[in-house]
Image (cartoon, rainbow, N blue to C red):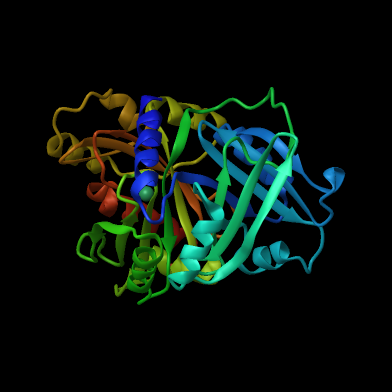
């Protein structure tokens, strides 16, 4: 966990000098049809602990939410009690998905004011959430599609939940959110890049054009925005012209617009993490045998058990800083929209560019089965 302490130290240093200080991801809030069942799936398949509950029994009449924790990762899953609630409308339109990519800030009121001054659209005015366990100030602005960015100022954990003790959850080694990826409509990538530059002062970390991310049939373009330290990285994808419909087009069709495509979570031992999820029945994407012939030839200096890597279908890539191991889950809901990545960085700061082709071919095989290619 030494990585996390370094990250926190860097964040604090930045907060002292930055005009839009950010301390990291606070949490992601999912809006779903049935929060109880989503919480159970995230608990059993992904090892999240149910740490809190908020609902009618605790005085919140219209929604039920579970607070899920693993390492530094916090998810809130929320469902609604009736059809007219915004959560129900969101689920009706988008299916289950991420409504809020919440950012931890030292001052939620100042963050809100600065963001509005820089042209962001308000979603929620600053307000205090307080209970016996702690206090937070929360505000929010609109992001891509129906997604928002909350600004959360808190010292301890998220208040507003009745604490739960979870003796059942078995963590799988997920430590922190590495990046959160957005899919946006054709032609909209650059305006969202500009939004993150203008509002957050983010810069472009990497740019992948359709040459880098194309298969025989489909293509996409991607730009990675970041805060300059690496604690918040937000890649943005848009579809590119191809012979067939790309995975981004498929997402946009089924999510009915822009939204969160995948959440990458870091583990220090991907082989152990994937061994565990496989035993629990979580499906991950596979690659053909030829992928590994190429990888073992292309990459050198790897300290990995090759047969285990091949058995678990783990992907590898390298860049100037080192290498990384990664894997992608299949969809965890009915619609082909949001999924997870598990990533173990061993020096590499990239996003698995060398795997894009193999990965997208794997995704296209799934898309074809769904009749959406
Ligand atoms: Fe990723």
Q: Residue drawn 41% across and 45% down?
A: 285
| Quadrant into which the C terminus falls | bottom left
**Along the horizontal axis of the image, is 195 left or right of 47?**
left
Q: Is residue 258 visible?
A: no
149 relative to 321 in the view: left or right: right
**Picture quadrant where residue 286 is located:** top left
Nearest the viewer among 95 and 293 is 95
Front-lying residue, 112 or 217: 112
| Foreground of the two, 171 or 111 | 111
- Residue 41: image location, x then y, percent: 63, 40
Residue furthest out toward the bottom: 187
In screen coordinates, is 367 left or right of 160?
Answer: left
> Residue 70 location in percent, x, y?
55, 32
In this rendering, the answer to whether 133 lies above or below 253 is: above
Foreground: 120 or 70? 120
Which quadrant holds the N terminus? top left
Q: Residue at x 49, y 58 (%)?
A: 111
Would you say residue 345 is visible in this rendering?
yes
Place residue 315 in its image quadrant.
top left
- Residue at image position (24%, 66%) is 210
């Amino acid at each position: 966990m030494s990585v996390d302490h370094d990250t926190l130290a860097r964040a604090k240093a930045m907060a002292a000098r930055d005009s839009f200080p950010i301390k990291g991801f606070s949490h992601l809030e999912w809006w779903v049809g049935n929060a109880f069942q989503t919480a159970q799936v995230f608990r059993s398949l992904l090892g999240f602990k149910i740490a809190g509950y908020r609902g009618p029994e605790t005085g919140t009449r219209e929604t039920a939410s579970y607070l899920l924790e693993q390492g530094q990762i916090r998810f809130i899953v929320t469902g609604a009690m009736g059809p007219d609630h915004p959560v129900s409308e969101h689920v009706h339109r988008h299916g289950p998905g991420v409504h809020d990519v919440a950012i931890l800030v030292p001052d939620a009121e100042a963050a809100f004011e600065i963001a509005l001054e820089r042209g962001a659209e308000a979603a929620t005015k600053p307000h205090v959430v307080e209970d016996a366990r702690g206090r937070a100030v929360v505000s929010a602005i609109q992001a891509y599609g129906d997604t928002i960015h909350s600004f959360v100022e808190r010292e301890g954990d998220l208040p507003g939940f009745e604490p739960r003790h979870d003796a059942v959850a078995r963590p799988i080694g997920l430590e922190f959110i590495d990046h959160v990826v957005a899919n946006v409509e054709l032609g909209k990538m650059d305006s969202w890049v500009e939004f993150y530059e203008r509002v957050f002062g983010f810069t472009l970390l990497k740019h992948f054009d359709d040459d880098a991310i194309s298969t025989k049939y489909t293509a996409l373009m991607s730009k990675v925005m970041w805060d300059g330290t690496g604690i918040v990285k937000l890649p943005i994808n848009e579809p590119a012209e191809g012979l067939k419909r790309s995975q981004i087009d498929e997402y946009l069709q089924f999510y009915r617009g822009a939204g969160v495509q995948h959440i990458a979570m870091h583990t220090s031992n991907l082989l152990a993490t994937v061994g565990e999820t496989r035993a629990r029945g979580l499906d991950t994407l596979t690659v053909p045998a030829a992928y590994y012939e190429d990888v073992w030839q292309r990459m050198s200096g790897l300290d990995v058990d090759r047969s285990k890597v091949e058995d678990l279908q783990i992907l590898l890539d390298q860049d100037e800083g080192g290498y990384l191991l990664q894997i992608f889950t299949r969809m965890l809901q009915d619609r082909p929209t949001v999924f997870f990545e598990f990533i173990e960085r061993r020096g590499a700061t990239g996003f698995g560019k060398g795997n894009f082709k193999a990965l997208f071919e794997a995704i296209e095989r799934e898309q074809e089965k769904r009749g959406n290619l």
